[in-house]
Image (tube, rainbow, N blue to C red):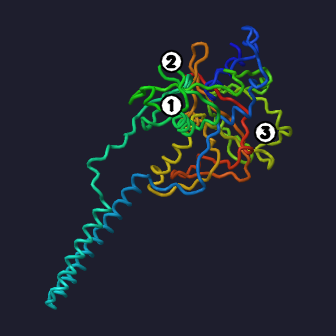
Amino acid sequence: MSELALVAAALSSIINCPVKTYYECVANELEILPNQILDLDLVHKYSFVKEGDDKAVPKPSFRQDDEKDEKEKIVNRRSRQGDKKDEKKVIHRRSRQGNEKDEKVVQRRSIVRQENLAQVNPDTSNLPLPPQPIQIFFKTSFGRSHSIFVLPNSSVLELKQAIQKKLYIDRPIRLGFSSKLLNDRRTLESYNIKRGDTIHILFRMLGGSEYYVINDDFISPQYNFDFTNLRDDGVVYTRGKELYKRPYGWRRIALNINKYGDNEWLGSAGNSSSEWPVTYHGTKKEFANNISEKGYLLGECKRFAYGRGIYSTPEVDIAEEYATKFTHENVNYKVVFQNRVNPVGLKKADIGDGKYSYWITPEEDDIRPYGLCIKVV
């Protein structure tokens, strides 16, 4: 089995776009354009797990809505009670005075109030109901199916933008339905798209190419290491003054990191200040979302403070939960990245279990992938 072909299959699943080896293209007489050459920067950009807004995560939204509704109910109830008390006082005072003019004033105020209420709450029984959102599904050639709620009269362009936001896609896509490419200007209902229908996402690279290409210089086989049949023997390893948990059960394929020049950050002494610690990250976008969810659950309603940045973990087992799955030569695999992260500015998140298993790197330049960890499933 070609190692480069295995890497190409893994990358295809990560970036949701076909990746071919140079040799495959030559063998099949496929054209290779300069913009089709895939580099590590592009791969890692697509796989970054970004989340956060420099604020503490609030309580779940439904709790907030409940509190808001309850507050509104209390305010409205007190307001109504106050109105009734005021009216009673006015009527009672003017009744004691026995002045008919005062009674007319009360009646006039009542009429005016009813008119004001009618203006605030007009009769809408004869107005047409607004269109209701429908749930539709969308999927890529390499990914699982997702769902989204949209209005039937939404444009195709609006749906595109919603999908790109949901899946963190920052490159051109096309949408297909019923064997047709969808026009951005048309609405979903014009294509007879109904509740439960599935839209297909088609990726198209700038320049019109439909696949990327990698060559031998994408990887560094001399630094590969197979942990597949190794088990934790109790030996403690450190990198960058942090505990290094080796990826037991995985096969690591080393990536070419020559572009970084000085490789002191990749040292293995363990106690050097120039070394960077090791982390892993799964390439599914649900990775960061689940961190905030666990913050609610494990934090026992405490706020889980985290900042904007790129999420990774020193625990390969946690990264595996969000590993991308792919198939190559009829064998199923999982893949996660092995990285080094700059200790300067690094944040460690406690989700309530005291383990600080989630690390946040503020800047993209401060996390560097140097290996693909692959395992058979």
Name which quarter of the figure residue 29 lies in: top right
Direction right: furthest residue: 262
Residue 179, numbered label? 2
Percent x, y of residue 351: 53, 51
Q: Name the residue under label 3.
A: 266
Residue hosting label 1: 186
**Which disc is residue 286 wearing?**
none
Q: Which of marks 2 and 1 is in front?
A: 1
Give the residue at x 68% y 51%: 346
Camera sees residue 338: yes
Q: Is residue 226 above or below residue 131?
A: above
Q: Give the residue at the far bottom of this rendering.
A: 97
The span from disc 3 to disc 2 (Cα, nearest Å) is 49 Å
Q: Earlier in the sequence, mark 3 or mark 2?
A: 2
Label 1 crowding class (10 Å Cα cut-off): few <14, some 14-19, many 20+?
some
Tell me which residue sits at (76%, 10%) in the image: 26
Among the two numbered marks 2 and 1 on one chain, the one whose residue lies closer to the N terminus: 2
